[in-house]
Structures are given as C-alpha cells and as structure tokens.
C-alpha cells in the first residue's frame, strides 16, 4: 500500500513540474523573448564586421564572428557575436538593425536564390552581408559597386 501511495505522490509531483515548464514557456513567448531565425559563421575569406574592431583601431583582432538573425515583435534585427581567442570572457555582442523587409536577391525568379544580401546598420555604421551559398557562412561585402546596387535595390523593395 505504501508503494502505491508513493507512486501517486510522484505522479502528482511530475504533473506540477510539467505545469511549471509549460507556464514558463508561455511567459517567455508572451513577454517577447526572441529566438534566432538563423545563425551564420564568418567565412575564412571574409573580414570581421566593423563593429568587432576596437574603437579607434584599424586592426582586426577578431578570431571569429557570428550573426544571428531575429524576427520578432520589434521587427528584424541581428546580434553579432565577436569572438577573440578561446575564452568565453573575450566575446562581445552587438545588436544591429536589419534594413528592409527581408533578404535581397538579384534573381528574376520568385523563389529565393543565392547569393542573398542583408543590410545591417547600427551606430552610424552600415555593412552589407552576403550569403553566397546555402550553408551557414557569411561574407562581408567590400565591393563598392555591389554595395551601391544592394542599397539602391533595398529602397525599391515592396513590403511582403
């Protein structure tokens, strides 16, 4: 009889824990917590984002950077993570705004094709990010002609 009572008690305890987990998830969802839509790593052929450089320095001392895209109640934004060395204390995160309604592609097709471009802006700095393939890498664009084409195309995009 004691074993039956203990199993009933454990079942009730498990239900309480499950209720708390569901309640916590619901609160996080309703409070506007954003989860990344996608995360990309800097390609080896790319330079680091300008936001990762120390103020007043032209040196690129960033070992790696990542971009995570978010689409939430507050609109589109990205978080850039700059990683310097192996230590978790040498990471910095920068929130940047994403310009436009979505990725830019110069294909005539209605489907999204590669390469695609995103325009990121924060603190008076604008960067154009290229996603050349269907993988998890990004390249920062330095070609002035491509930057001008992307920026002019972004102004003419219809909202979805």
Image (cartoon, rainbow, N blue to C red):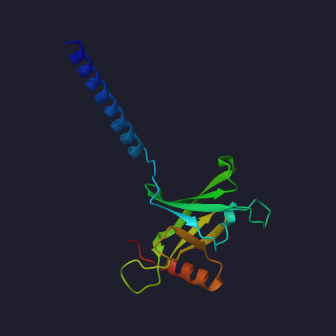
Q: Position of residue 2 (x, y in %)?
A: 23, 12
Q: Residue at x 65, y 58 (%)?
A: 82
Which quadrant holds residue 139?
bottom right
Q: Is residue 145 left or right of residue 9?
A: right
Q: Position of residue 60 (x, y in %)?
A: 74, 65
Depth order, front residue of 82/33? 82
Q: Residue at x 37, y 84 (%)?
A: 109
* Image position of 88 with respect to 106: above or below: above
The answer to whether one can see residue 123 in this image is no
Q: Residue at x 67, y 52 (%)?
A: 86
Q: Position of residue 133 (x, y in %)?
A: 49, 76
Depth order, front residue of 136/153? 136
Q: Is residue 35 left or right of residue 127?
A: left
The answer to whether one can see residue 157 in this image is yes
Count of numbered badges drawn on the protein? 0
Quarter of the C terminus within the rendering: bottom left
Which quadrant holds residue 19?
top left
Q: Is residue 110 left or right of residue 9?
A: right
Quarter of the N terminus within the rendering: top left
Depth order, front residue of 102/133? 133
* Image position of 62 with respect to 131: above or below: above
Depth order, front residue of 47/150? 47
């Amino acid at each position: 009889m004691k074993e039956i009572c203990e199993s009933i008690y454990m079942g009730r305890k498990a239900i309480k824990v499950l209720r708390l987990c569901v309640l916590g998830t619901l609160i996080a969802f309703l409070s506007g917590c954003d989860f990344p839509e996608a995360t990309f790593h800097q390609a080896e052929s790319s330079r680091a984002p300008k936001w990762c450089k120390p103020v007043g320095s032209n040196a690129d001392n960033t070992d790696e950077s990542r971009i995570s895209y978010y689409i939430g109640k507050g609109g589109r934004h990205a978080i850039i993570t700059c990683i310097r060395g192996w230590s978790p204390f040498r990471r910095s995160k920068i929130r940047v705004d994403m310009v436009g309604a979505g990725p830019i592609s110069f294909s005539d097709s209605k489907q999204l094709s590669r390469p695609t471009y995103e325009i990121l802006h924060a603190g008076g700095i604008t960067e154009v990010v290229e996603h050349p393939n269907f993988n998890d890498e990004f390249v920062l664009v330095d070609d002035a002609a491509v930057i001008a084409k992307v920026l002019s195309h972004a102004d003419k995009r219809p909202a979805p």
